[in-house]
Image: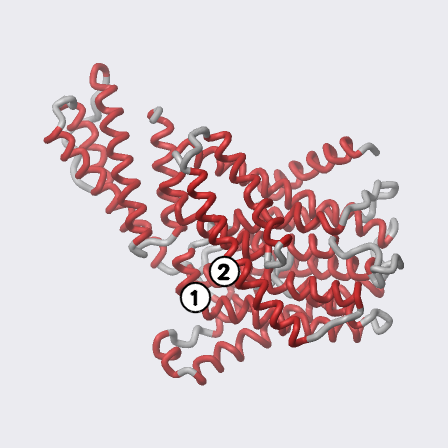
Amino acid sequence: MPLVDLVVALMIMAVGLGWLARRINTPYPIALTIGGLALTFVPGLPTPRLDPEQILILVLPPILYHAALITSWRDFRQNLRAITMLAVGLVVFTTVALAWVAKLLLPDLPWVCCFIIGALLSPPDAVAATAVLSKLRIPRRVVAILEGESLLNDAAGLVVYKFAVAAALTGLFSVPSATVQFAGLAIGGLVLGALIGRLAVAVQSKLRDPVIEVAFTLTMPYLVYIGAEQVHVSGVLAVVTFGAVRAWYAPELYSPETRILAYGVWNVAVFLINSLVFILIGLQLAAVSGFGGIPLELLGAGLALAAAATATRFLWVFPTAWASRKLIPALAARDPMPSWRILTVISWCGMRGIVSLAAALAVPYVLSDGTAFPGRDEIIAVSFVAIVATLLFQGLTLGPLIRALGIGEDSDAREEEHLARLKTAYAALSEVERLAAADGRYTEEAVVAVRAEYAGLLGQERSTEPASGDDADPVRRLKLAAIAAARRRLIKLRRDDQIGDETLLAIQRELDYEEARLGG
C-alpha cells in the first residue's frame, strides 16, 4: 500500500473512531486504543518502518505544548509539592518496581530492557488524564494535581528511558552520573524554555496576521524541542516551560480572531497526532505478534505489568501523603490529610497513553555494533498491552468509582467563575457609563441598550429592550468597548491570582466569540 493511501486510510479511521467515541460518550483515547488493538487481527496490513529517533520529535512537542497552554498554573503552583512527589518520586519508584516485575515475568529479557519497560510505563499520560477527567465532576484540586503530574512526569520518565536505552546501546551506566545529568537536563530545559518563550512573545507581538500567528505557534514547539535536544537539555521541560510562558501572555498577545482560529487548529492537530500514534502502534504490534494476536506469554506479562503499575501507585500515594505530614507538622496544619476517597481517586488515575506509546516506538532497531536491539518486539508488545489495560480498565471504571465513593465537584470552581463573570460584567458596565459621560458620539438609545444588557448580567432590572435600526452602529461600537473592558478586568483577575486559567479561558472564549460576532 503506498504511503499516501496508508495515511489517508489512517485519517479516515481516526475520524470514524472519534465520531464513535462521541456517540457513546467515551473519551477518544479509549476508542483509539481499541481501534489500534483491532488492527493486530487484520491480515496483510503494511508495517511501515518508522525512524525511532523521529517518533518522539514528531509526537511530543505539540502534545506537551497544548497541555501546557490549558493548564491552570495558579493551581499548579499551589499543589507543587504533591505534583513533584508524583511526577518525580513516583516515576522513579515505578520504574524500578516495574523493571523488577518485568524481569520476574520475562527472565530471558536483559535487565536493561526491563528498565526500559519500567521507564516506558512509569508516567501516566496528560492526554488520557485530561480526556477522561473532562467527562467527570471531581474536586478542582484533584484535577490540578493529576494534570500537573502528567506534565512533569513525562520529563522524568523520558529521561530515565533515554538513560536505559543509552545503557543498552553502550553497555555503560552510572547512578551518580545519571543523577547529575538529570539535574542538568531539568534545569537547562527550564531555563531554555523560559528564554525562548520570552523571545517568542516579542516576535509574536510583531505579527498581525492570524494565519501566520497560528502557523508560528504550530512550528515553535518543534523548534524548542529540537533545540533543547541539540544542546543536551530536557526537550520535554523546555516545551512545557515555553508553553507556560506563552499561556501567561496569550490573553494580551493574541487577537480574538487568532485565539478562535488557534483553538480549532490545535484541537484538530492534537487529535490527529494522537490518532496516528495509537493506530501506528497497532500496525507495529501486528508485525510483532503476527496475525492472530499477541503470544500468551507477552499478553500475560503486559496485564501483570498493568496491575503492578496500579498497585505501585497505591503503594506510593497513601504512605507519602501520610509520611509528609508526619515529618513536616507545618504542612499538616497548612494542608490537612486528604480523605482516603480522594487518595483512592488519585491512585486510580494512572492511565498510560500517548507518551508511553511514542517512546515504545522509539526503541532503536539495532545496537551500536549493528546487531538487533535485544527484546524490542517484547518491549513493544508488553507495553501496548499494559497501556491498553490501564486505559480501558481504569478509564472506564473511574466514573463509577467516583460515584461509588460519593465524590462530587467542589463549589470553589463554580463560585470563582460566577464571581469573575460578575466582575467582568461590572467592568463592562462601568466602561459604558464612562463613555456615555465623556463621548458625545453615543446616543442615549445606544447607551440604554448596552447598559440594559450588562445590567441583566448583573441581575439588575432591565429598563428597556436593546435598540435597533439607526442605533445599530453606535450599539456595536459601545459593545466592543465594553468587551474590551471586560477582557482587561478578566486578565487583571488572573494576574492577581483571584482566578485560575480554567476560568479565564472559559470566559475569554465567550468574549472572543461575541467580539467576532460583532465584527470587531
Give the SS element for disc 1.
loop
**Residue in the picture at 14% in, 35% down:** 434
Of all residues, the one furthest to the front in this rendering is: 231
Q: Is residue 73 visible?
A: yes
Quarter of the view holding residue 470: top left
Horizontal side of 274 relative to 146 (left or right) equals right
In the rendered image, the vertical position of residue 88 relative to residue 258, given as above or below: below
Instruction: Check disc 1 and report the residue beneath it.
Output: 79
Give the SS element for disc 2.
helix
Instruction: Check disc 2 and report the residue beneath it.
Output: 148
Q: Position of residue 31 (x, y in %)?
A: 66, 47
Horizontal side of 333 relative to 76 (left or right) equals left
Of all residues, the one furthest to the left in this rendering is: 437
Mark 1 Cα shell of 10 Å, populated few (<14), some (14-19), many (≥20) = some
The one of 432 and 495 positioned closer to us in this rendering: 495
The one of 172 and 344 positioned closer to us in this rendering: 172
Horizontal side of 53 relative to 405 (left or right) equals right
Asked if the residue under mark 1 is in contact with the one under mark 2, i.e. CB atoms within 8 Å, the reply is yes
Residue type of the residue flagged with mark 1: Asn
In the rendered image, the vertical position of residue 385 relative to residue 271, given as above or below: below
